[in-house]
Amino acid sequence: MGNRSPTGHQPIGRQAVTLWSSRTSRPLSEEAKNLTYSLAVDKRLAFDDLAGSKAHVKGLGVSGVLTNEESSILLTALSQVEEEFRNGSFEFEQSDEDIHTAIERRVTAISPEVGPKLHTGRSRNDQVACALRLFSKRELTATAVGIIDLQEVLLARAVDSADAYLPGYTHLQRAQPVPLAHYFLAHAWALARDVDRICDCLKRVDVSPLGSGALAGSSLKLDPEYTQRELGFGFLFENSMDAVSDRDFVAETLFDLALLGIHLSRIGQEIVLWSTQEFGFVHLDDSYTTGSSMLPQKKNSDTAELTRAKAGRLIGNLTALLVVLKGLPLSYNRDLQEDKEPLFDSLDQISLILPALAGLLAEAKFDLERMKEAADSPFSSAVDLAEWLVALGMPFRQAHSLIASLVRDSIANQGSFEDFVVSHPSLGKPALEVIKAGEAVRRRITKGGASTGSVKQQIEQLRMRLEQDRNRLQYGRSGSQQP
Ligand code: ARG
């Protein structure tokens, strides 16, 4: 083993071998290296790895595995590496297998005497799980804040749509008039559940795996409780093999993001539909649309279309990870390295969609006249008419069939529905009031229904909810306790 460089590496030509290479007799082939090295992806965990390493070193110091001097030398070296990442001067080497080995290599170069003690009582298995959990905690929290920002836009649009209404659809057929605000709030409430799901997921992300070692812990006197507190984790692992080998917290995160993406895709789809000339319910600001390279008259809703499309990718990332995890024997397997790309990609995609959709909605102009026109067909109040009869004592089934026959007659004879209503003995003039434009929206009284009254209540409730959720996330971000 002569010929070792001060970094602990054995140079072979231009290529140095890895930190673990003493076990193997030949260097890793280029092909295997291309397949197994993950630096290009996981260098994104640099700061989380450094945080984990600092806590680990402090822990070794307080439990007496390292002397105070050794731990302070390592901490200084880690801070220097951190600064190098911050100012962009950190230099990777060809031999850097991943971010964790790159950092350890550099610490050892800074302090050839104490650097080799950094990995004491630790494995990359608990190290990588630790960094990934720190990363996920922060990024998930930021994602939830991004969702709330979008909800604020929906809330604002609900507030300023005042008394506007449009047709509500089932089967994409006009069903009943609904306040435009109720529509915005419907999406906002779905997003509230996404925030809730993320907060819940955060509890299971918030677990320190440090101290698990490769799979079995250590015979050295480590202090996992100390490192847990130091890193602000709310919980500590219960079982070292479980801690290094499960990525259920990543799968859960990917599910939450996939479902969020599905919710966003539904908004995207409606915007696409509504901005067609056929619907004409919304005019998108030019800053959120594109032209066509060939057709001079086109204005395309690409922002909304990609919002719709990204859900596919988010579902794909979830599926990819679930399949990687399926059937993996305990404990760590290199397969687990495949957790990062889907996770990073889903977080990235969501962080692109949320602000773009928020901006699009904030800038969009809704054509309230056009919506009203579409909703004012007297047929759209057919059920209100039936309910009016019910209030007068008629069984619903009978009322339903009576009104249905009037609709049928009106369509078959091309007569106005109002005329059929006025001339029917059970209905007459007073019934006309019920099908008057905008009346249906005012008449509904059920909680959470599509009515002016319910919308007012929902706006208040949502406002409170958004404030609570912001506080909840603030709390989760700063401390070890979860909401
Ligand atoms: N880059 C690896 C990962 O992300 C690090 C863990 C490697 N552990 C090992 N025992 N080979 O999973």
Image: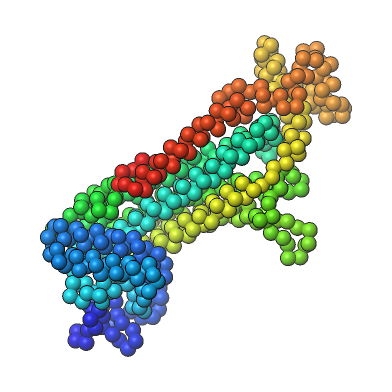
- Asked if 41 appears above or below 377 in the picture, the reply is below
Residue in the picture at 33% in, 68% down? 83
Which quadrant would the N terminus be assigned to in this image? bottom left
Between residues 343 and 140, which one lies in front from this camera angle? 140
Question: Disc count in the image?
Answer: 0
Q: Nearer the viewer, residue 415 or 58?
A: 58
The residue drawn where x is 65% and y is 45% is: 270
Residue appearing at x 75%, y 23% in the figure? 435
Visible residue check, residue 314: no
Q: Position of residue 19 (x, y in %)?
A: 26, 75
Q: Quadrant of residue 109?
A: bottom left
Question: What residue lies at 68% left-to-right and 51% top-to-bottom?
Answer: 285
Rendered position, 326 above or below 407: below
Quarter occupied by the C terminus: top left
Outermost residue toward the bottom in this view: 13
Residue 419: horizontal and vertical position, in percent? 84, 21
Q: Quadrant of residue 16?
A: bottom left
Is 439 displayed left or right of 102 in the figure? right
x%, y% of residue 199? 40, 43
